[in-house]
Image (tube, rainbow, N blue to C red):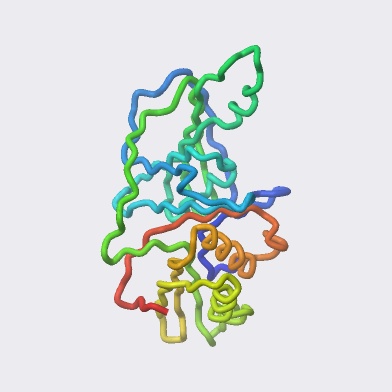
Amino acid sequence: MNKYITLFLIFLSIGGITSCAQQMKSNAVVSGVPDSTYKNVIEIKDKDLVTDGKSFLFDRSIPANIEAPVVFVSAKVPVNLLMHIYPENQRLTVVTPNWKFYDETSGQSNIGEPIASSIIYQLNRENDHVIKDSLVIMGGFPKMEMIEDTPLGENTQKIYLTEHYGSICCPRDPQWDIKPNIDSFISDFEKKHRVKIKDTYLEYTGKEGEKNYYFSLSGLSIELKLKFLVERTALLADQRLNPSGSLPLIFTAVNVLRNDRMRLR
C-alpha cells in the first residue's frame, strides 16, 4: 500500500498475505464470567454498521477521552477483520460473541440450546505487528457498562478516510499521479449516484504542496459511504495485496480535531 495513504481499513488475509503481521500470544479458556467490569464500552450493533456482503463499515467512532477503548461487537463480523478495527488505537480490547462455538453447536438437537459464550481479544499494535491475547469465556459475557453514541464536540469531525499527499516536486510523491485525481473521482461519484459529498477538509502541511484530505462523507447514506470507501480504496491500494479489489475490507470512523490549517474543500 502506498505509504502516503492513510486508510482506515484492513485487507483480510488470503494465502498468507496480510496488511500487518499477527502473533497470538495466548488463547485461554475459562468457565464462568470474570469479576472485573469493563466501563465506557462502545457497542457495535447491526444498526451501527453496513456491509455489502464482503466489506464492512462501522459508523460509530471512539471518543477521544477514552484512553483504553473497549469495543463490544455484538453484530456478526468475521474475526479476521475485527483484529484491525480502529487502527488509530495502539491498544484495544474487543469483545465478541463466540460465533464459531454457536455455529458448531446450533442445530445439534442432542445438546439443546448452547450455553452463552464470548471471546475477549486484547490487541497491542506495535509498528507493523498486531499482538493479541484472547480469552474464551464459556458461560456468559464479561460485565460491561455501555455508553451511548454522543454528539461530537464543536471542533470535532467524524472522518472515514484520510489521504496524505507529499511533495509535488522534490521528490514528487507518486500520489499526485494517480488517475483519476481526487477532484475527478469525487465529481464522477457524485454524478453516478446523484449525490453531493459535503464537508471534505483540506489541510496544507508544507511548502512543497504537501496536503491532507479528510473525508467526512456528509451527504451520503451509510451504504454509499461504504461504496465510496471501497471504490476509492481499490484505486489507491497496492495491487499486490488486493488484486482487483478482491479482498474484504473493514472501515472504521475516527474523530479528528479540526485545526486552523483545515479548510473545507
- The mark total stands at 0
Whether 162 is drawn above or below 55: the answer is below
Q: In this view, which residue lies farthest toward the left?
A: 154
Q: Is residue 189 above or below residue 99?
A: below
Q: From the viewer's perspective, is 109 left or right of 131?
A: right
Quadrant position of the C terminus in the picture: bottom left
Q: Position of residue 146 (x, y in %)?
A: 34, 38
- Vertical side of 81 occupied by 145: above or below: above
Q: Residue at x 54, y 62 (%)?
A: 224
User: Residue 240: in sight, yes or no?
Assistant: no
User: Picture coordinates of residue 212 (x, y %)?
Assistant: 45, 74
Identified at 70% across, 57% down, the residue is 246
Q: Position of residue 243 (x, y in %)?
A: 72, 61
Viewer-proximal residue among 184 and 23: 184
Q: Residue furthest front?
A: 194
Residue drawn 65% across the image and 25% down it? 104
- The residue lying toward the viewer, choosing from 108 and 11, is 108
Residue 198 visible to the viewer: yes
Which residue is situated farthest in the top direction here? 110
